[in-house]
Amino acid sequence: MIVGMYVGVDLGTTAVKVVVYDPLTKKVQMDISRAYEPVSTGPGMFEQNPLEIENAVFDALRQVARSFRDVDAIVLDSALHTLLLLDKNMEPLGNIIPWLDERSVEQVKRISKDEQLTQHLHKKTGCPADTVYPFYKILWLSENGKLKSASKIVSQKDYIIYKLTGQIVSDISVASGSGCLDIHTKQWCYDELKDLAGIDSEKLPGLVSVTESFRLCKAAAGRSGLLEGLPVVVGLSDAAASSIGAGAGIDDSLTLSVGSSAAIRTIVSQPPEDYPAPGIWCYVLDEDHYITGAAIKNGGYVFDWYVKLFSRCDHGTVVKKVEKTFANLDLENSVLFYPFIFGKRFPKFDPTPSARFDRLKSTTTEEQVARSVLEGIAFNLKRAFDVVKTMPKSLKKVVATGGLTQADVWMKMVCAIFNHKILLQSSRQGAALGTVLYVLNKGNLCSLAAEFENTSEYKPDPELIEHYERLYQMWLDGLQ
């Protein structure tokens, strides 16, 4: 029997990443991506062209079809917290609103003033009051008369599923990141949406399991070059898929994920009864598992911001400069950086940008400033790590994934700041591979451990631990 390839499609914020995985050799045979960017449309407002993302997906699939004849399935995952309105013909009414859009600040502030309602929504949906969630953007759209002509309210993943299969559905994993899903019953919060936003149930797509499979429709087959009728598995959220792709276990591990934003998360078998901080969230992974943790807006994008705005060098050169001086643990001349260029999501929502450098001197070097930026990102994650590490039943391992984790010097920083060993997968395919492995293992997360053997191990250096304990306390003392 010939076993074909599995194609993992990761719909990210800035690119679609596609891997072709061979189940027989357990090797990734192709790893490609197509980039796109959110665009600013006003103060605090960001949007993405759905046709640009759609075209990127089909362009990548055409490259797959040219290279592989035997494809058994397409498996999807997607970034959380996206929102798109469709008309009666299921065509976009405007652009996708991604997670970084902050147009709903006033709606979040208003809901937050009602402590009982805020706690009710947090406990029911797993989503704290925050502009990242489509629920608050739906309130903004409703109050600004933008929903009247909308036939469906969907995510970017729902839209791509429709373009691939002709089906309008939403999987419970991505839906749970909207703030509109009851994570306990795994049904839409119809009452809250009706009472607070005037949304009728027919505007929401039907909910399906993450393992639900549809067939590649004729139009999509023609555009992609793949066979009509090919199974298309709706798959997971990128948060769940990247944790699986990094080798995380159930109730015993944490995942550090650092892309443009960042997160500390853990896969658990039950949602928390009480949330240890207002900014802690909990989303559905599948029918039997959840993913809970804290998200940080100010991740790798902060380093990009620093390089573009302040540095005379490119990213790689800046990192190399930090590496050359990394052994110099000069506490007296250390610069402190507070990375809040996008405000805060943790420990609670605060939309006010408040990034700053502290302890700059006439003798401060470029290397010290660059180092402080990387340290500031890590210190901010340390605050979340110290809370989230109490949530699983045990903590046997910490795994890392994402672009910034590929910088060796930053990984050495983080494991010393966290004072914990960190495992880094040698594979860089992340979420796209994770969602494929989940489907191939039929959702059995326990059996996935054998898939992850090639890891790099970072152990905290005792000298660095002592240095960073003191510097982190100085950083905390300077928080405003």
Image (cartoon, grey):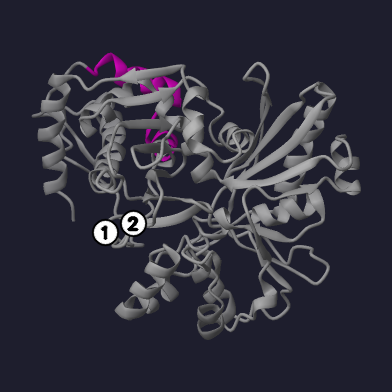
Give the quarter of the figure containing the C terminus.
bottom left
Q: Is residue 50 left or right of residue 344?
A: right
Q: Nearer the viewer, residue 165 or 308?
A: 165
Residue drawn at 61 percent across, 80 percent down: 199
Residue 325 picture location, percent across and down: 24, 17
The residue that mark 2 highlights is 280
The residue that mark 1 highlights is 277
Residue 313 visible at all: no
Report how far apart the C-alphas of labels 2 and 1 lie in the structure.
Answer: 6 Å
Binning the other alpha carbons within 10 Å of mark 1 as few (below 14), some (14 to 19) or many (20 upward) gives some
Residue type (three-letter) at the residue carrying disc 1: Ala
Q: Nearer the viewer, residue 67 or 307?
A: 67
Residue type (three-letter) at the residue carrying disc 2: Ile
Secondary structure mostly seen in the magenta stretch: helix
- Residues shaded magenta: 304-326
Residue 320 picture location, percent across and down: 36, 17
Regarding mark 1 in the picture, which secondary structure is present there?
loop
Q: Examine the image and state in which quarter residue 83 appears.
A: bottom right
Residue 379 picture location, percent across and down: 24, 40
Image marks 2 and 1: residues in contact by CB distance under 8 Å: yes
Residue 41 visible at all: yes
